[in-house]
Amino acid sequence: MKVKPGANRKEEEQMTQVKSIEQNQEQTINRPQVTTLRALAVCLAISVAAAATSKAMNLKSGDIVMADSSSAVLRVDPKTGAATVISSGGNLVRPFGVVVEADSNILVADSGALAIIRIDSQTGSNRVVSSGGVLGTPYGITLDHQGNILVANAQAVVRVDPQSGAQTVVSANGMFRAPVGVAVAGDGGIFVADMTGTIVRVDPASGTQTNISAGTYLVNPVGITIDDDGSLLVADEGSHALVRLDAASGAQQVVSVGNDLVTPVSVVIGAQHDVLVGDPDAFSLNGAVIQIDPASDTQTNVYMGSGELVNPRGIALVPTVRGRIDQLCPCQGPSSGTMWKNHGKYVGAVSKVARQFVKSGSITKDEQRTIIHEALLSQCGR
């Protein structure tokens, strides 16, 4: 790889490292001690699965995935609003929350089946990942930075192993009355929307709860997500509004209220840094996915229900390739409770995943080099 004239010595060294990693990836991966290898295997094993499906993947980055409580999960084209059923029936009874995994398969919190269900995004087949135990009635669902499933079940926040389905209560009782929405911040903190009008922060390690904000525009908060600036965006069906909260002070600001919003229950950041809201009662109970420009408060209908599919609940966005790499190799460490041994191990893992995406045709060689270069410049594993 050529270095542009005038690049400083440090950048030259970093670009040389990129070339070295591309040529010697297998050696880089095979040097860690046994304990690090076991942790690293989590990242690399998932990356192989992602590459295996990405070449023939039906879902594209930026696609909207929507759970309809009539027992279906749909793909919605964010540009045309055209909807296609990905999966229906089978184990799906009343899907509520939805999240897309790094390999583009879909996890559903089904409040009717009382289960977490995984959908193969290519075939549409669905199977139960976890049910019973302390799972209760799952509503909100998200992934932490290690790929574990987090569920809000109206009583507690439960962590679920995505492979074994093993369940662990993260936090229960205390300030919780009806926790139904859940999101994870950049630092790993868990934010929960409680339908009684409260937003609670949960420490992922201790389960300690902190009241972030309550009352005023928070009447019946259901959906919650984290914006790029770290603020919280809440879909509140009681105030018919999209509300922004300062994650530290709890200060509230109405982003959009009324008009097409009737009972907003889900929210996600769109591919263009817009906001997408799921509302089952919009447009005379037809249900809709509504796009909101947070700067101008402009509301645009992206999808409106029809026929039997008129109950949109949870919505999610198919992540970009970089987003999937962040999911597969999180900066915090390759697995829960395990940090990267050093910076080189993190860069080696990212390089391995990027190479798999090149093989699958998801990214170009130039994009691979850029991804590795950014990993080299990061603080992960330092």
Image: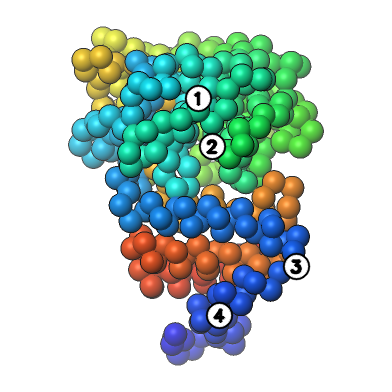
Q: Is residue 188 left or right of residue 142?
A: right
- Tell me the crowding category of disc 4: few under 14, some 14 to 19, or many 20 or more residues within 10 angstroms, Cα based: few
Q: Earlier in the sequence, mark 1 or mark 4?
A: 4
- Tell me the crowding category of disc 2: few under 14, some 14 to 19, or many 20 or more residues within 10 angstroms, Cα based: many
Q: Is residue 92 left or right of residue 309?
A: right
Rendered-image quadrant of the C terminus: bottom right
**Between marks 2 and 1, how big is the CA–CA gap?**
19 Å
Helix, strand or loop at mark 1: strand
Label 2: which residue?
226
Label 3: which residue?
33
**Between marks 1 and 4, how big is the CA–CA gap?**
42 Å
Mark 1 vs mark 3: give the one in front.
3
Label 1: which residue?
109
User: What residue lies at 34% left-to-right and 34% top-to-bottom?
Assistant: 124
User: What residue lies at 66% left-to-right and 45% top-to-bottom?
Assistant: 187
Q: Amino acid at mark 1?
A: Ala
Q: Residue furthest bottom?
A: 5
Horizontal and vertical percent position of residue 175: 72, 16
The numbered mark at residue 24 is 4
